[in-house]
Image (spheres, coloured by chain):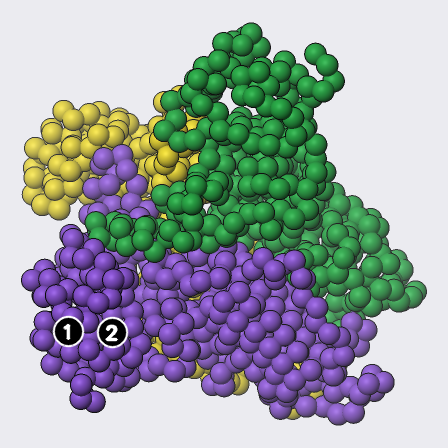
Chain colours: A yellow, B green, C purple
Amino acid sequence: MNQSSSLHSLGIGIATRNSRDEIIEVYYPLVLRDPHSELVEALRSCCAYAGGNVHSVISEAQLTELLGSPFVAADKALSALLRQLNESTQDVCAMFISEDSAPSSVPEVYLKLHLLSHRLCKPHSLNLTGAFGVLQNVAWTNQGAIDLADLPARQLQARLKGELLEVMSVDKFPKMSNYVVPKGVRIAHTARVRLGAYLGEGTTIMHEGFVNFNAGTEGPAMIEGRISAGVMIGSGSDLGGGCSTMGTLSGGGTEIISVGKDCLIGANSGIGFPLGDRCIVEAGLYVTAGTKVLVLDNANQVVGTMKARELSNKSDLLFRRNSVTGAVECKANKTAIALNEELHTHN
Amino acid sequence: MNQSSSLHSLGIGIATRNSRDEIIEVYYPLVLRDPHSELVEALRSCCAYAGGNVHSVISEAQLTELLGSPFVAADKALSALLRQLNESTQDVCAMFISEDSAPSSVPEVYLKLHLLSHRLCKPHSLNLTGAFGVLQNVAWTNQGAIDLADLPARQLQARLKGELLEVMSVDKFPKMSNYVVPKGVRIAHTARVRLGAYLGEGTTIMHEGFVNFNAGTEGPAMIEGRISAGVMIGSGSDLGGGCSTMGTLSGGGTEIISVGKDCLIGANSGIGFPLGDRCIVEAGLYVTAGTKVLVLDNANQVVGTMKARELSNKSDLLFRRNSVTGAVECKANKTAIALNEELHTHN
Amino acid sequence: MNQSSSLHSLGIGIATRNSRDEIIEVYYPLVLRDPHSELVEALRSCCAYAGGNVHSVISEAQLTELLGSPFVAADKALSALLRQLNESTQDVCAMFISEDSAPSSVPEVYLKLHLLSHRLCKPHSLNLTGAFGVLQNVAWTNQGAIDLADLPARQLQARLKGELLEVMSVDKFPKMSNYVVPKGVRIAHTARVRLGAYLGEGTTIMHEGFVNFNAGTEGPAMIEGRISAGVMIGSGSDLGGGCSTMGTLSGGGTEIISVGKDCLIGANSGIGFPLGDRCIVEAGLYVTAGTKVLVLDNANQVVGTMKARELSNKSDLLFRRNSVTGAVECKANKTAIALNEELHTHN
């Protein structure tokens, strides 16, 4: 095997096309980071893969040939999957990513989103530049993905038969759970977690929680607030109901927000700057990067005033609004955060 | 054609009935504002329309006769639609609105809600007085609209076969996307936009966004907050995650809230009075109509105190809470609001 | 009938099993609190019930025998239901609860959750200790409940046929509306009300509302905020959009929050202590148990400072943040809360 056979990642899946024969989404039951070079070689010879970031439809004959290759034949799980795919009534599609460059096709973006949600790549580790522009706006329905141009006719067809075409979302990104449900998570309401979210094992996303793509949690976490695109939450942290993490897309600044380990972000609060470990933000308090904060010593005496962004990534801080003076204060957090034991046992 | 043939609006669609044979919802694939007088005349003669705001079931024979009328025959799209309706296993229903008076039937309310969502009428331009009382509470399921009295039996029937009757909503108003998906919008989670919402082209409703009926956006907008009944948002404005616009129904006052152009309403903030253009409300700040606001000059000196309602519809204002004094302040907004370009390019 | 025939409660329903033959959820169309002793006796003899909190599969023969018992034969509705169950392609399961002890099986927890949602038992009146640990994490799909271990294969099977396995939730608790829709409620978005919620007649849960299990409303209420586990809301109260009631599970204290009658909790506000009747919390204000509050007299003069928890369960209080001084204030609420009449007429 020469070095040139290596791939960044590989996906084999089932594609949906619109009435103009364009691929509008891909479901990859097989997703591999750094696929084995022998598998890549087999694909090269069976599926005429000639390098680069490309996708191709795999024919029944090609799949059959692939099933006969020594590497595939020796891998029972892989063989079983490929045999199932060979019975698909739908297009079987392979996506080869040789280099992590800006994605240029729908199958390429979808493979990267799968890599994130399968925890094969961490948020910020993949080039997603321009992904928004590559994806089409799609109607996500109980009959699968439907191109918006095809939607009214499909709705009418269903209604004429007394059936419902349920349109659950009209968006570029689908929900994660119809593609990937990673191990050890609960997602009370899946409509609020996009494909491309990275949920660490032990994460619970409650009904009010939300996770955008290229964002998520490092490990166990109780999420009842909103994790904006690009935001990562450390292990053991708790985002209270309705709390907000400011994204960089709309209204926010350019700095990427993050939350460290064992933080407690109160209900209906919000942050516009990155927190270190073991920080607490009081319920209902929104601290933006530009918020002036009175810094208190252990005796609760004001020792100075800083903008919150100057406290970025610092640990053991408690942010609150003094309910008598109205001032936003910051002091060292001496309270151990004892997240409810039973709750986290059953994440 | 005499003047008397003119109609305010016309809908032809498919109705769902409950077990008491009452119409509980209507899906109108054909929705016309100011329908052509020749079409109205054809309906008058084929479907025995005798004037007024009435609905009637159209029989196969009537539809066939209508298809033969010169006006319909000359309109290919209309003919095709009517031919499809003639194959429906469901009731085909026509709704004629001659005058925009308070609606008195389910088909009449539904036609008005369709008119709004198809952008054929602006919010506040239609008489919806008493619409709440006309509509029935309905179970919206994967098998379509089901009367609540019929629901337990239907649930049991499904379960006996090992199937699920998924009850998605129990409400008087359905979700918009199962009736209308207007051009050029994204709705990340359709359960949060009611039929009767008016979404301007270029609007994105994110997962945390919400739009009630008779409310919406004039043009491009990024909506991650809640647009209450009756509230309109101007072009280019951005409602941050979880922000609130106070409605007039519950708890709010009687003044109708609105947001002008190019405003930025921060995450988890809220407004209880109408904003002009290019206003900013800081994340986390709720300004009700009665909030006393310190008005600042360009040098940040307090020049007076006003109730927020006195600042209604004024442009170029920035509202914030001073994080040192705790006072709510208002100053002229000198910051140009540069909404993220890529984001809005791909609305 | 001897005393020993009495049961706390009884459910007969349809169970879903995973591929390891474990019961993962039960839908009970028959739910009885204090079932008639003759029915219990009939079950004892037909279904070999020997006491205790147990569940058992009822065979066709047993159901037939039960249908022949005098008590069942005399009850037309019960007979009709049991005859339908006897045609089920699924397991018919009876759950007997003789004593309200900590539940030890999935059918037992589900019966208790049904009892709550059918308004047969009030929140806090049932022993649910350890229920979280008893329940399995389940994928709730358009094909019903699916064990997470079985999910990927089921997703692939659906996709191979060009169909969608829609995964709506991955959680221990299902949504209420697929089991119980109590009389006289609206639930705009059912994904946000868990089985085990108790919704009093006349309750409307708007899209932004949320109700956890063992929590709910006593009577008519307009809920656009979040009712955490264990929290009860009194009749005539209004929870504004996005408001938060602090739960005891995560981040909150140990005191159980409640809201009295005719309260108005503003949009995006929050409470961390129990309120009495006719209280108002201003929109956007979060009052935790530890918040220091300035207490005002009728002339708006500060008469003292208290922690909010010292005001627990007191009536006729108004909480607001002074928008000039930034202080959280409490004064006697002299404003009658006139909830919008039309709104509540059509709850």
The residue singled out by tag 1 in the image is: C43
Output the chain of dot 1.
Answer: C
Q: Residue A334, position in %: x, y? A: 53, 85
The mark nearer the N terminus, 2 or 1, is 2
CA distance for labels 2 and 1: 10 Å
Q: Secondary structure at mark 2?
A: strand
**Quadrant in the picture for the N terminus of chain C:** bottom left
Vertical order, B249 against B49 (above or below): below
Give the vertical position of C103 relative to C163 (above or below): below
Tell me which residue sits at (29%, 45%) in the image: C165
The chain identifier of the residue carrying mark 2 reads C
For the point 50% across and 45% down, which residue is it? B175
Q: Quadrant of residue B34?
A: top right
Q: Is residue B21 left or right of residue B160?
A: right
Please say whether residue C119 is visible from this viewpoint: yes
**On-image quarter of the C terminus of chain C:** bottom right
Query: Label 2 belongs to which residue?
Result: C10
